[in-house]
Image (spheres, grey):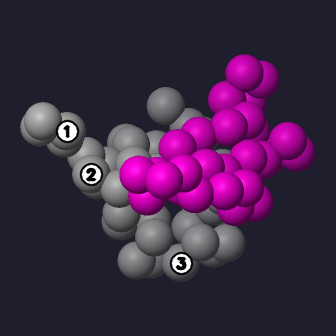
Amino acid sequence: MSTIMRTLRNLRKIGIKEYAHQIQNIGDTKAGTYIATDRYGNKYYENQEQELPLRTRWVDYKQQEYDP
C-alpha cells in the first residue's frame, strides 16, 4: 500500500483517468517512464527515482485476464 503523499503526487502526474485505471487494475498508483510495448500489447514502465526499492518496474497488461 502506498502512502497518501505518494498517491496524491502520482494522481497529479498521471491524471484522473489513468489514476482510476491503475487503481482498478493493479491496486496502486504509479508514475514513470514508458519503456516498451511487447508483441502482445503489454506496456512496460520504469521509475528509478521515486518508487520503493524493488518496485521500480511494472507492466500494464493489455488484457487483465488471459483466457486461451
Q: Which residue is mark 3?
A: 15
Task: Give me the residue at 40% from left, 77% from top.
Answer: 17
For this view, does 41 lie left or right of residue 30? Answer: left
Pick the front one: 43 or 56: 43
Q: Which residue is mark 1?
A: 66
Q: Which residue is mark 2?
A: 63
CA gap, disc 1 and disc 3:
27 Å
Task: Give me the residue at 49% from left, 31% from top.
Answer: 1
Residue 37, percent from left and from top: 58, 57
Q: Amino acid at mark 3?
A: Gly
Q: Quadrant of residue 14?
A: bottom right
Does 58 appear above or below 14? Answer: above
Does 65 appear above or below 33? Answer: above
Residue 6, percent from left and from top: 66, 50
Q: Which mark is residue 44?
A: none
What is the magenta range? 32-59
For this view, does 62 lie left or right of residue 9? Answer: left
First in residue order: circle 3 vs circle 2: 3
Does 1 appear above or below 21? Answer: above
Task: Give me the residue at 19% from left, 39% from top.
Answer: 66
Residue 28, percent from left and from top: 46, 44
CA gap, disc 3 and disc 2:
22 Å
Residue 44, percent from left and from top: 61, 49
For this view, does 18 lie left or right of residue 58? Answer: left
Given the current orientation, which residue lies at the most extreme top position?
54
Q: Is-magenta flag for residue 56?
A: yes
The reply to whether callout 1 and callout 2 are in contact (CB within 8 Å) is: yes
Q: Is residue 41 visible?
A: yes
Q: Amino acid at mark 2?
A: Gln
Task: Give me the residue at 36% from left, 63% from top.
Answer: 21
Pick the front one: 3 or 17: 17
Q: Amino acid at mark 1?
A: Tyr
